[in-house]
Image (spheres, rainbow, N blue to C red):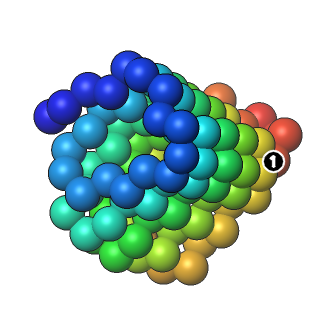
Amino acid sequence: MRTITDTIGGDATIRDAVTLQGMVVGDVVVVAGGYLDLYGTCCRNLKIEKDGVVNLYGTVSGDVTNDGGRLDVHGVINGQLVEIAGHTRVQSGASVAGVRR
C-alpha cells in the first residue's frame, strides 16, 4: 500500500491500494480494484465505482457516491451520501451532511 501525504492539485483516480493522509483539491474516483484509506481531505466529491473499496476516516467536503463498491464511513461527509449500489456502512460518531450518527 502506498501512502500519499502531499497535496494533489487536481482530481485523483485510485486504481491500487492507497492511504491518503494529505489533500486532494479535486474529485476522487476509486475504480474497480482500488482501495483507499482516507485519513486526509477530499475538497470536492468522492465516487466509489463497482468493486472499489473506501474506508473514510477523514473529511470529504462534497458528496460521496457509492456506485457499487464498499464504503465504510468513520469520518465526515459535508455533502450528501448517495447510495446507488454496493455496501455502505456509517459508523457511530461519523457525520453526514452535518448530522452526527
Total number of numbered labels?
1
* Residue at far front of view: 9
Compared to residue 77, the image places residue 71 above or below, namely below
**In the image: residue 4, left or right of residue 61:** left
Query: What residue is rendered at 71% in x and 41% in y?
Result: 61
Query: What residue is rendered at 26% in x and 39% in y?
Result: 18
- Residue 81 sits in which quadrant? bottom right
Label 1: which residue? Answer: 97
Q: Quadrant of the N terminus?
A: top left
Compared to residue 56, the image places residue 30 above or below, namely below
SS category of the residue bearing label 1: loop
Q: Quadrant of the C terminus?
A: top right
Query: What residue is rendered at 60% in x and 39% in y?
Result: 25
Q: Position of residue 14 (x, y in %)?
A: 32, 53
Q: Position of residue 87 (x, y in %)?
A: 43, 66
Instruction: Name the foreground residue: 24 vs 35.
Output: 24
Mark 1 is on which residue type?
A: Ala
- Residue 71 sits in which quadrant? bottom left
Instruction: Name the foreground residue: 31 vs 37.
Output: 31
Query: What residue is rendered at 65% in x and 68% in y?
Result: 82
Q: Position of residue 41 (x, y in %)?
A: 57, 31
Compared to residue 15, the image places residue 57 above or below, namely above
* Residue at far bottom of view: 84
Can the viewer see residue 19? yes
Within 10 angstroms of label 1, few (less than 14), some, or many (20 or more) residues?
A: some
* Residue at far right of view: 98
Q: Position of residue 98 (x, y in %)?
A: 84, 40
Can the viewer see residue 57? no
Instruction: Name the foreground residue: 9 vs 88.
Output: 9
**In the image: residue 72, left or right of residue 42:** left
